[in-house]
Image (cartoon, rainbow, N blue to C red):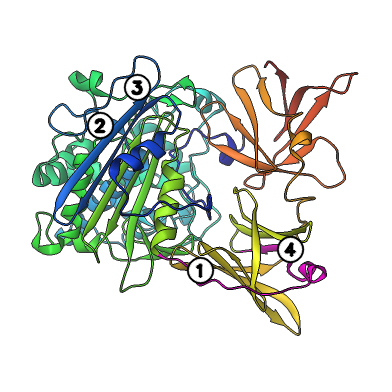
Amino acid sequence: MFTRMLFACALFAASAVLAQPAVMPLAAPMEQFAREALGTQPGMAVAAAWRGGKASFAGVSAGSNIPAPATKGPNATLFEIGSISKVFTGLLLAQAVEAGDLRLDDTLGLVLRDKVHFAHSEVAAVTVRQLVTHTSCLPRLPPDFTKQDYVRESPYRSYDRARMWTTLGALKIDGPAPCEARYSNFAFGVLGEILSERYGKPWAELVRERIAVPLGMRNTVQVLGEHAQRLAPPFSGATPASPWDMQAFAGAGALRSTPEDLLLFGRGILAGRQGPLGPAAERVLTPLASMDGGKIGYAIRVNGPPERPTYSHTGGTGGYRSLLLLMPDTAEVVALVASNAESSVWRMANDMLVARYPVDNGSFSLAPDRLGEYVGVFRESRQNALTFVAQDGRLYFRGTGQPFIALTPSGPDTFNYGTRGKGVFEREGGKVKTVRWLVRGGERLGQLTGEPVPAAATLPREQLQAYVGRYRAPKFDFMVTDADGQLAVQLTGQDRFPVYPVAGQSDRFAWDIVAAEVQFERDTGGGVRGLVLHQNGRIRAERVD
């Protein structure tokens, strides 16, 4: 079976540490947001905001025979919102807790005592709180998610409740829980089915009755039915994609909606206990655990200081990207959707948080020969490391799964990426031992390890161009691209992840999100003719561009 992190057709969530230097102001017109989201990719994008007590909308489209989207009203264009569905599941749980029907400390063994026979006590001891905060130790996807599931156009379509309960009963985890927060679609599939079992109704019906109807959300559904023609055409880059249908994973990402409805959803939450959702609207925002340098409530992410928080979630399926952002201090809600998996929505989500929480910056003179003091892999968690590399008189930084960015000295033992992020190194006995990375209103703490650093942060463009192109394996393609001196590899239906050169080996690059490497092969003339993926075996792909 393929290793999960790289080859899962997952419901993605944005976790970029940083993006491009330019940051669009939060007050920018919605049309500007929509156009930047879609860029030159085919598909549709709609941006919406609730500001100053009124809503504004803008929609754009690109590509052959793709009309402009309908931004509001009963016939508005629908988009898959992916993992934003998790916030709906979190709100359903908050309502259940308020009603006394479930408790956060209820265990799987208790709530599923008549449904699942647990082979391992650690899994039976997982709590509802741990499911909704990604601290349950459950993997991102269940272990029986097969190679065939990964390459399927709609990977979750056939995964039903019976299969989920069987897999959950046999599951063995690293536990005991709680574990450090690790994003898990499996956990939210389980939570959605627990709620469905508790109330004897499908998850989608609970969403309709308890959230959509009270808030007047007329365009939020799981099953399209007669509305199928209103769904925006999905793409992954230039390639048409397929909608994703779900059964047991509904609570993790099955909803289709519109930005107009997402504004109503966000406003309903910000209205608090006096609004249509009652006390559950406050409960859903309560921070319950730490995650990615911030906090997490009932599925929703929390960034910034307690007196000025931002609540958000992103979503993505095979052909869609989405964002929901709530800012209680200004009573603003922003929603952004696009029907292309290669859209800029997730980068823009990061940009909005960076714009709300800039870091202080300064200028400082540091001798280039001192940069070596800061080089190393500083581990924040099992899943994420903060890596620093010195090259050509500059210090470069990356978080796991992210491209390198160049930093500038801003003070003794501090380096900045403008006002977007700041690294503060701390010493013990004169030696750098830890780093605090300040970003998006929070901080990530990394401890220096002995892990090897990449051979280089960037390579000459002419060297990388030899690898750029499309490579075909039996059931999927590899797209290899370059940007800013770094190589990235994308599999069909997957997100694009950077790879870095392996020290001492020519034409070989490695991912840092998973134990996998790619070896490029050359012909007798020196041209790159194929590649071999090394991950739990070997997969060869021929160059076809």
Kind of residue sitting beneath label 1: Glu
Kind of residue sitting beneath label 2: Gln
Alpha carbon separation for disc pair 1 and 4: 18 Å
Kind of residue sitting beneath label 3: Pro
Residue beneath disc 3: 233
Please state the horizontal and vertical placement of residue 82, each as a whole percent of the image. 36, 38
428 in the magenta segment: no
The answer to whether marks 1 and 4 mark residues whose Cβ atoms lie closer than 8 Å is no
Please state the horizontal and vertical placement of residue 454, each as a whole percent of the image. 76, 51
Q: Is residue 28 visible?
A: yes
Q: Which mark is residue 490?
A: none
The region drawn magenta spans 357-379
Residue at image point 80% right, 50% down: 455
Q: Which mark is residue 376?
A: 4
Residue beneath disc 1: 443
Quick one: label 4, few (<14), some, or many (20+) residues within 10 Å? many
Kind of residue sitting beneath label 4: Gly
The answer to whether marks 2 and 4 mark residues whose Cβ atoms lie closer than 8 Å is no
